Image: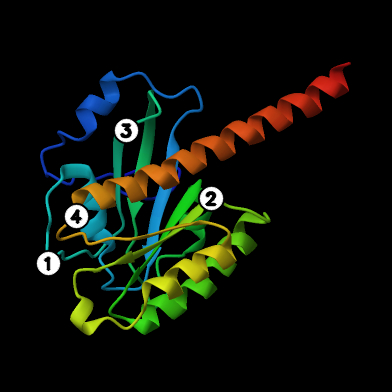
Amino acid sequence: MNSSTGLAETSPTGSGSTLRPYLRRKKSSLGETKIAVVGASGVGKSALAVRFLTKRFIGEYDQSNDAKYKCTTNIDGETVAFELLDTRCNNDDNGTRDDVLRWADGFMLVYSVTSRKSFDALTEIQKKIEETKKAGHVPISVVGNKSDLAHIRQVTQDEGSKLATEFGCSFQEVSASEDVVAVTEAFHVLCKEVVEFKRRSRTFLDRVFGLKKS
């Protein structure tokens, strides 16, 4: 249990093998990147997280608590250490509790292409993130899961792309069950944006404090 957030750390394999390599590798100079996967219940948040971390697909996932994983990934030749929080929904909060929103550096907003309700929920999720973070821009991405279920699709790809444009963020449609490459790319895109955002923020602070010192 992480004492600062109250969020449990879990290994997706149950053996802790995902955590051990993380402890031995050199961390990014920007520290850990913290990403929360949020969205309505049943959209496949856990399936996406586990698919990315282990390359395996789990169709049914009984999740009663938030699950937090530590891992590393390589982005443009740099090893980036990050924490991934797979959120649970509680009373239709879509995983956007205050402790989650304060903890994360970036957010993956997930909906199912087979659920109009889960797609419509993203607008309120994005609004709550910005209000809690008190910032005009927070690194987020919109991800439409279950693209393989085209025969029961309720949300078009154009609608997903349009919403992401309104949010000013990236957009991907993926299938956790069929396309590990697309799932990995979705996480990498968001992780890269968070790293770049932190780098810009640090540069800005360096300039501000540098001017004050001079």
Seen from the viewer's position, the closer of residues 152 and 15 is: 152
Crowd rating for badge 4 (residues with CA inside 10 Å; few <14, some 14–19, many 20+): some
Circle 4 sits on which residue?
179
What residue type is disc 1 on? Glu
User: Mark 2–mark 3 contact, CB under 8 Å?
Assistant: no
Q: Which class describes the residues within 10 Å of circle 1: few (<14), some (14-19), or many (20+)? A: few
Q: CA distance from mark 1 to mark 3?
A: 26 Å
Could one spot residue 11 in this view of the protein?
A: no
Kind of residue at disc 4: Asp
Q: Nearer the viewer, mark 4 or mark 2?
A: 4
Q: Looking at the rendered structure, which numbered label has been put on residue 181?
A: none
* Residue at 46 percent of width and 67 percent of height: 161
Sequence-first tag of 4 and 2: 2
Residue 109: horizontal and vertical position, in percent? 42, 62
The answer to whether residue 141 shows anywhere in this view is yes
Check residue 139 in the rendering and tell me which mark sits there, or answer none: 2
In the image, residue 21 lies at what x, y percent? 22, 25
For the residue marked with disc 3, what is the amino acid? Thr
Say what secondary structure mark 1 lies in: loop
